[in-house]
Amino acid sequence: MDKEPVISIGIDLGTSGCRAIAIDQDHQIIASHQQAITETGTEQDPQCQWQTVKDGLSQVITQCKGLTTSPILITYREVVPVGKKIGQAVTSLGSTLVVKLISEQPIFVPEQGLYRHRLANLWLVGGASNTGSTVLRHFFNDQALEQLSEQIDLKAPTLDYYPLLAAGERFPINDPTLQAWLTPRLESDITFCHSLLQSLANIERMAYQCLEAAGTNPVAAVYTVGGGSNNTVCVNRH
């Protein structure tokens, strides 16, 4: 769960197809896909062209899965390809924990850490917590986290933490003075790791409850992206 690299997306849309590429911070192409417009007479059809762009981007983002948690990648990989349906949500578990939900309502509550982005005729509403894989990496390296995760019994009891490395939280609790809650430190690394992961899940659940309480559409489905999506405990933590 290293810090995510910066990845840029490029689109070249022509009358016969769309080429989409992903470029890393060293300006190297790390993924590419050529998506053709196959239906006769549809070259100038905006809806067909837009679908071609979405299909091309979906292929490129699939190749980049787990490399980044940037909003653009979250939007195209997990929202647009699955139909831009109201109530679809994305949890990005990278260095921080970010949740986004497609809503008919343009919810914007800055005092609560809620923000919005327009998505066609809908809205992408969400917030970002200061917790995330950075906290996990403070206690365990990647190898240890993988080994511990393999030994976790999801049905085993856990402690309720609020994992932060420094004072202050943005969402779902907007409090610059909020202190981390990481005690007691359990002797068993397996149980401690399990408790950290479950606490992330609890914060995620609280975040979606805040979205709905603020007036978004109810959550219909949640997709997980980011480095944490490669961890089976993370994606099965509910």
Image (tube, grey):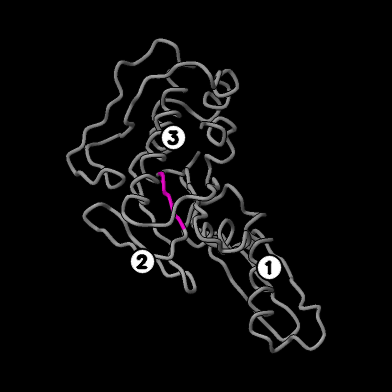
Mark 2: few, some, or many residues within 10 Å (few <14, many ≥20)? some
Look at mark 3 in the image and give the residue it sits on: 201
Of the two numbered discs 1 and 3 in the rendering, the one whose residue sits closer to the viewer = 3
Q: Residue at x 59, y 71 (%)?
A: 10
**Numbered mark located on residue 106 in the image:** 2
Q: What separation in Å lies between label 1 and label 3 (alpha carbons)?
A: 32 Å
Look at mark 1 in the image and give the residue it sits on: 56
Tell me if residue 225 can be seen.
no
Of the two numbered discs 1 and 2 in the rendering, the one whose residue sits closer to the viewer = 2
The image quarter in which residue 53 lies: bottom right
Relative to the observer, which residue lies in front, 43 or 23?
A: 43
- Which residues are the magenta region? 97-101
* Contact? badges 1 and 2 (CB < 8 Å): no
**Any magenta on residue 100?**
yes
Q: Which amino acid does label 1 sit on?
A: Gly
Q: What separation in Å lies between label 1 and label 2 (alpha carbons)?
A: 28 Å
Outermost residue toward the left in this view: 177
Of the two numbered discs 3 and 2 in the rendering, the one whose residue sits closer to the viewer = 2
Q: Which residue is drawn at 55% across and 59% down?
A: 79
Q: Position of residue 163 (x, y in %)?
A: 33, 31
Q: What residue type is labelled 2?
A: Pro
Q: Please indicate whether residue 8 sits to the left or right of residue 211 in the image.
A: right
Q: Residue at x 81, y 78 (%)?
A: 38
Q: Please indicate whether residue 54 sits to the left or right of residue 133 in the image.
A: right
Where disc 2 sits, the SS reads loop
**Any magenta on residue 111?**
no
**Numbered mark located on residue 48 in the image:** none
Relative to the observer, which residue lies in front, 61 or 101?
A: 101
Q: Which residue is drawn at 50% across and 62% down?
A: 72
Q: Where is residue 77 in the image (x, y as percent from the top left)?
A: 59, 58
